[in-house]
Amino acid sequence: MALITYIVEDSLTIRENLISTLEEVSPVKVIAFAETEDQAGRWLAEHKSDWQLAIVDLFLKEGSGFGVLKSCQKRRAEQKVVILTNYATADVRRRCAELGSDAVFDKCNELEQLLDYCSQVTPGDALH
């Protein structure tokens, strides 16, 4: 059973590579994506129960991943939101945790940990 995943990433190259890697190596099925904070907020509001995992970049074409995190604060406990960023500093990790992220991964050197995380989240838990 696939982990129903939503991606918020504005770089086409990174998004395409991320989706293909996730779907090839992890039990992930990406169902939609957004490039801006507003697009992500609208989709998440309209599809409250349609996803299990959201993977969010912090710096977007418009807005930020921090705003996306805020829009996910009332999600169900089994819905997970992780940040994937080039700026995974201690301060960024702390701020993301304060806003409710389940994890933060560095794009440059923590992709393997992201894949492991995706494999550990139980598909199906969020869609009961």
Image: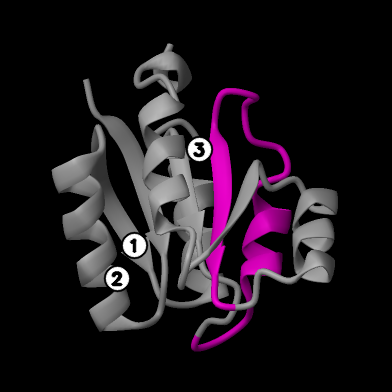
Query: Whole-percent x and y of residue 58?
Result: 60, 73
- Above/below status of 29 relative to 76: below
Give the residue furthest to the bottom: 61
Q: CA distance from mark 1 to mark 2?
A: 9 Å
Front of the two marks 2 and 3: 2
**Disc 2 marks which residue?**
15
Q: Which mark's residue is nearer the viewer, 3 or 1?
A: 1
Give the position of the N terminus as an image quadrant: top left
Give the CA distance from mark 3 to mark 1: 14 Å
Give coordinates of residue 62: x percent, y percent: 55, 86
The residue shown at (62%, 81%) is 63
Q: Are marks 3 and 1 in contact (CB under 8 Å)?
A: no
Q: Which residues are magenta?
A: 61-86
- In the image, 65: left or right of 91? left
Residue 87 location (% of width, % of height): 64, 77
- Residue position for label 1: 33
Q: Could you tell me which residue is drawn at 21 percent across and 70 percent down?
A: 16
**Mark 1 or mark 3, which is nearer the start of the sequence?**
1
